[in-house]
Image (cartoon, rainbow, N blue to C red):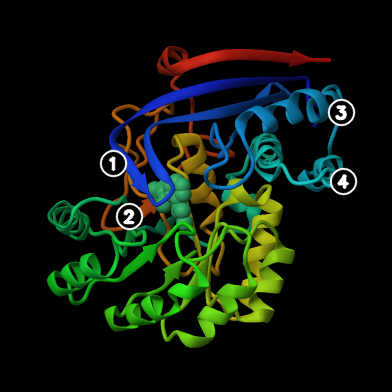
Amino acid sequence: IRIDAAEIRIVRLPLLTPFVISTGTMTEKVFPLLTLRGEGLEGYGEGVMDLWPDYLEETQAGGLAFLREVVLPRILGQSFASPAELAAILDPWRGHRMSKAMVEMAFWDLWSKALNIPLCTALGGVRDAVQVGVSLGIADIPTTLERVGAAVDAGYRRIKLKIKRGHDLQMLKAVRGAFPDTHLTVDANTDYRLGDLPLLKSMDRFDLDYIEQPLAFDDIHDHATVQAHLVTAICLDESIRSAVDARKALVAGAARVVNIKVGRVGGFAQARAIHDLCAAFDVPVWCGGMLESGIGRAQNIHLATLANFSKPGDTSSASRYFKRDIIEQPLEAESGLMPVPKACAGLGVTLDREYLGTVSGQVEEFRR
Ligand code: OSB
Ligand code: MG
């Protein structure tokens, strides 16, 4: 496939309700969308980097400079027979996994469209719908109880509660008390320290499926120490950027569950390598999310069709976050199952160009 042209646009989607996590509050989703053109087709890749380094280090400014000045000049006008051939251009460069993922994912979309097969088929997926839960932002206890009830009634398969220091045990006591049989998890987005071990241990009594990323974004070692003292599984998110990270974490016993975000780890090949490695360790994985638009959500859903995605992921209905999406197909879950979009080959979704135009800022075109 020859890559003839590329486009990068910045998209701003207002969120229906502010999303609060331990590191901050999001009121709108601002993300870069990459289009690769070739063979008369288009492939899309949504970037998950934020404006500022508040989840991981990568920023939109840095990542997009890397794409504009380093990656695009090396791939425009070039032909690649497979995603692996394209990855060889990206591999030598340090970090920038989120921007690398944009290119790699857009090429997988283009490649599977050229083969006229769904992306999940190209990836080796085994199911037509994926299990999903919800991720609930930090709120007061009555609001949280109401949100949990609504999500349980809607059929979601697990409820993930965002926590931070000072907003944990009381809230968990209230939610577990009201919902004794619901699959519950918590996500601290790195807010705790090794010294919080007694507090983390006291979460064992809430029968959580796992505690997601309690410690620092770049830590594996201290998570292993904490995991050794807990009955509850630790799930790593921020700390796993590659299959090498995953190997170190699993060998060290730092996690018994892994959250895979394709946009965080550099693309589908790396996501699949982490998935396969976890399967070899008998560690279940699930597909995380970054409040993506329909393009990013479609990427996540296709990935989650791989066999070892045995726990419900975060790709809940788009209508929970946005009044209107930039794609034409509604990505809505039913009874906790999100169908794999297949309106066309590849990602299986089409852009709502009219709406996309109204929510796009800067649009840059690149050709050789
Ligand atoms: O840690 O999983 C996370 C959203 C933004 C940044 C980090 C995280 C999240 C979520 C959102 O939990 C899940 C979703 O996309 O619905
Ligand atoms: Mg997380």
Instruction: Give coordinates of residue 367: x percent, y percent.
Output: 78, 15
Rendered position, 9 above or below 340:
above
Image location of residue 80, percent across then percent down: 84, 36
| In the image, farthest residue toward the front | 195
The answer to whether marks 2 and 4 mark residues whose Cβ atoms lie closer than 8 Å is no
Q: Which residue is mark 4?
A: 92
Q: Amino acid at mark 1?
A: Arg
- Name which of mark 3 and mark 1 comes first in the sequence: 3
Q: Position of residue 225 (x, y in %)?
A: 57, 81
Q: Which numbered disc flags the more N-terminal residue, 3 or 4?
A: 3
Q: Residues within 10 Å of mark 4 (few under 14, many from 20)?
A: few
Q: Earlier in the sequence, mark 2 or mark 3?
A: 3
Relative depth, front residue between 178 and 153: 178
Image quadrant containing the C terminus: top right
Please name the residue that numbered disc 1 is placed on: 320
Mark 1 close to ligand 1, CB under 8 Å: yes
The CB of the residue at mark 2 lies under 8 Å from ligand 1: yes
| Dot 3 beta carbon under 8 Å from ligand 1 | no
Comparing labels 4 and 1, the label whose residue is closer to the camera: 4
